[in-house]
Amino acid sequence: MKKIDKTAIIKNSKLESINVTIKKNVKLTNVQIKAKQLLIGENSILIDCQIFSEGEVIIGKNCEIKEQTIMNAFRGITIGSRCIIDRNVTIGGMQSEQSEISIGDDCVILYRSYLNTTRKILIGNNVGIGGYSLIFTHSAWPNILNGSPNKFGDVVVDDNVWIPWNVVILPGVNIGKNSSIGTNSTVTKDVPKNSFVAGNPAKIKQTSNNKKVLTKTKKNSLVLKILDDFHNYSQEFLKIPNKMEIKNSLKGKSSNNKKSDKQNVILSFKNSLLIYALTLDPNLNNKSSILVSFKIPQKFKSLKTQEWIELDSLNSNILSDTGKNFSSFIRRYGIRLKI
């Protein structure tokens, strides 16, 4: 049974599955997938990749799987929404009856990483895995009858974990939520939540049960800097002319004081405006703008044509190219919107 939305674009691709469901605006180019069941969520893009499983392959919405990626897991492959699997990533290796991988929402696996699925790999939400990193679920080669070591074990990576480039994670390791690993580290045992570990083998360098909370003043200052960077990025890299204005209020005069907590920023593009305010006035009447703030009044959220970005919740309603450019740009600061 095949349910392929009429807006989906499928080119030079081979889909071998009993049940295929492909949602709207999906784009597949030079893709090979073999699975018992296949589901690809809306707006996902797969290019020049191969995916194999004897179970289900489920890919969430707004995902991107890039060129030369190969994925293989006997029991099943699940990828949440808004994930990016970069070029030349390999997920597979020696298969078994326990081979499986599950990846949560808002995750990134970067260039030439290798994830071994001889056993199960469970990755939570908002996890970043840097390029050339290695995750193993088995360690075996010399004959165990000659006294050689042998180990198989699932690997669990909890929510909000950052694994930078060139990290090795060995079988049976659990990495607790909100933890980070040092570059070039080898992780041989469990990492407690809220920890930073580094070294070969990796050891705990720092633990903290108290997440740093920024003041509104500090957060506002950071957003003003990001908007200034986006203004320059749009001008110099994207070659999109725009004007940046700083005002004491959205109805007031412009200001040269870049340190004011009450400042509002307007970026004017040819066909759109991007407006930021620490606190938005619910009576603001500018439906053609992209509104950015830490909390968006419900009045604006209820309008389907009103674009907005809520920085505290990371929710958004983005329709225009300017909005898409901005949401993509702020990912470099770890701000990943739930589009």
Image: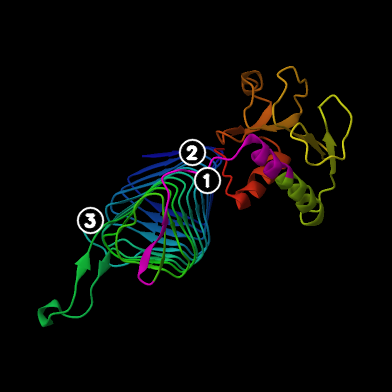
Q: What is the magenta range?
A: 200-224
Q: CA distance from mark 2 to mark 1?
A: 9 Å
Residue that label 1 marks? 44
What is the residue that sits farthest to the left in this orientation?
Answer: 145
Q: CA distance from mark 3 to mark 2?
A: 29 Å
Picture disc at residue 19: none
Could you tell me if the residues under marks 1 and 3 are in contact, i.e. CB atoms within 8 Å?
no
**321 versus 52 height, above or below:** above
- Residue at 62% x, 52% y is 332
Picture disc at residue 98: 3
Q: Residues within 10 Å of mark 1 (few under 14, many from 20)?
A: many
Query: Please, what secondary structure does the residue beneath circle 2 have?
Result: loop
Q: Nearer the viewer, residue 126 or 44?
A: 126
Could you tell me if the residues under marks 2 and 1 are in contact, i.e. CB atoms within 8 Å?
yes
Q: Amino acid at mark 2?
A: Lys
Which one is in front in this view, the residue at disc 2 or the one at disc 1?
1
Residue that label 2 marks? 23
Q: Looking at the figure, which quarter contains the N terminus? A: top left
Residue 59 visible here: no
The reply to whether the magenta stretch includes residue 147 is no
Could you tell me if the residues under marks 3 and 2 are in contact, i.e. CB atoms within 8 Å?
no
**Mark toward the start of the polypeptide (2 vs 1):** 2
Q: Looking at the figure, which quarter contains the C terminus? A: top right
Residue 268 percent across, percent down from the top left: 83, 38
Residue 239 percent across, percent down from the top left: 81, 53
Q: Residues within 10 Å of mark 3 (few under 14, many from 20)?
A: some
Q: Amino acid at mark 3?
A: Gln
